[in-house]
Amino acid sequence: MNNRLTSLLLIWMWMATAASAQTTTVEAVVVDALTSQPLPYTSIFVSRTNSTITNAEGQFSISCQPSDVLRISYVGYKTIRLTAEQTDGLVKLMPMTTSLGEVTVRPYNAYLKEAIKETERQLKKNKKQKANFFYRQTAYADSVCYEFMEAFLCGRSAVWLRELALNKGRFAGIQPDSTHYYSFYANFFSTSQLQLMAMPGHSVSANDRYPLTKYYDSYYDLSFSMMGSSDDRLLAVHFRPKPTDKPILDAILYFDATTFRLRKMEGDLLNMVILHREQRGDRNMEKLREAFNQTSYDDVIDTEYHFVVTMTEERNFLEVESVVIDEEHQLHGKTIHTHSLLFNIGDREIGRGKQLGSQANLHDVIEAQGYDPTFWEENEIVLRTPVEQQVLELFEGKKLFGIF
């Protein structure tokens, strides 16, 4: 009898332990509480090994235990915390109120100068810190998505990204023919490395157009606004470029008004040119030249990039959490739009890979690495939009991954 009772107790304890260890998948959309508009790239944090961001449509999916607390934050909105059980499919974030209008007020320069000092200090102290990132890139010709790429990158992450290396990647794309024209952007990943100031040990000159230097007023007109409450205030500084034909930012930088640390920046990189090639690599070049009746496949195009960069301090220093880049231009009667998302995956280890220069062809590096379909079945990281999911399934159905 005692043995039977002991066995029953052990079974009950096992069932209770198994139940407590069960995970649930939380799926929801994050919206502005006042306008009901989705909030893309909102941070969803459970732990350093389990976090994500919303996709372009404000949707997210994350697996966790029912009692786990999700911290949901978007710069310029009030952060909320919900248990997985409390999340019912729709999360509403309340925007902060702006306490002062967007006017140029001299005392605000003191805030900015302190913010520049703090950013320099963070970079100098933590410049060698590295992080792993999930990367997704898509390209469209008008409404047709002809490229899908996912990768895991590693790079130095304090203040801004640099020295990126490829850990793992996969790529699928539709190659051009005599009736369909596509343009492949071989090193779009490099646009994620948006430099804000000079590196420690490098002298800053009056020719530097970085916003966070002592020469900022030579290149930018500034306007300021303060938002939030007394215990959570943000200083928004709009750097409007003075007339120039050189590459320069037009961006709003958001700083914590208490710690002076950068929280987010959003804007455009102006006066840029890109070199697009109509064929990835040189293979079949003669055939394509004949089909398109062209002797060259290189086009120098004027363009600009829209970017959104958010920061995190989960490791007690200022580092990049996510970078979103969009580029669009007209080419041969089509609107070519390239989009990328890069997200800091915390303490999830993927390994170490090959260093990438800013001119590296990521397609070729992925090709040399080979394709591991099993790995990608388990590593979505950021929920795909319905269109991205359809494209992925189409390319998988046509077995385009791993074929170069």
Image (cartoon, rainbow, N blue to C red):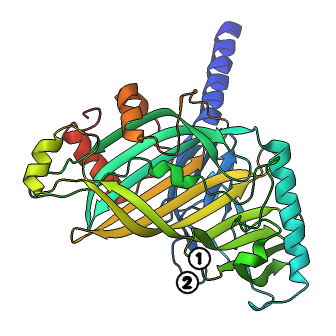
- Kindly tell me whether residue 284 is visible in this rendering: yes
> Which of the 4 image quarters holds residue 225?
bottom right
- The percent position of residue 117, horizontal first and vertical second, equals 88, 61
| Residue closest to the eye, 141 or 398 | 141
- The percent position of residue 82, horizontal first and vertical second, equals 68, 59
Residue at the location (9% across, 58% down)?
Answer: 179
- The percent position of residue 52, horizontal first and vertical second, equals 58, 50
- Kindly tell me whether residue 371 is visible in this rendering: no
Q: Is residue 287 left or right of residue 72?
A: left
Screen quadrant of the N terminus = top right
Residue at the location (43% across, 36% down)?
Answer: 169
**In the image, which disc is placed on residue 32?**
1
Residue at the location (49% across, 66% down)?
Answer: 272
Three-letter code, disc 2: Thr
Three-letter code, disc 1: Asp
- The residue carrying pointer 2 sits among few (fewer than 14), some (14 to 19) or many (20 or more) residues within 10 Å by Cα, namely few
**In the image, which disc is placed on residue 35?**
2
**In the image, which disc is placed on residue 166?**
none
> Which of the 4 image quarters holds residue 215?
bottom right
| Residue closest to the eye, 75 or 110 | 110
Residue at the location (75% across, 86% down)?
Answer: 98
Q: Is residue 61 left or right of residue 309?
A: left
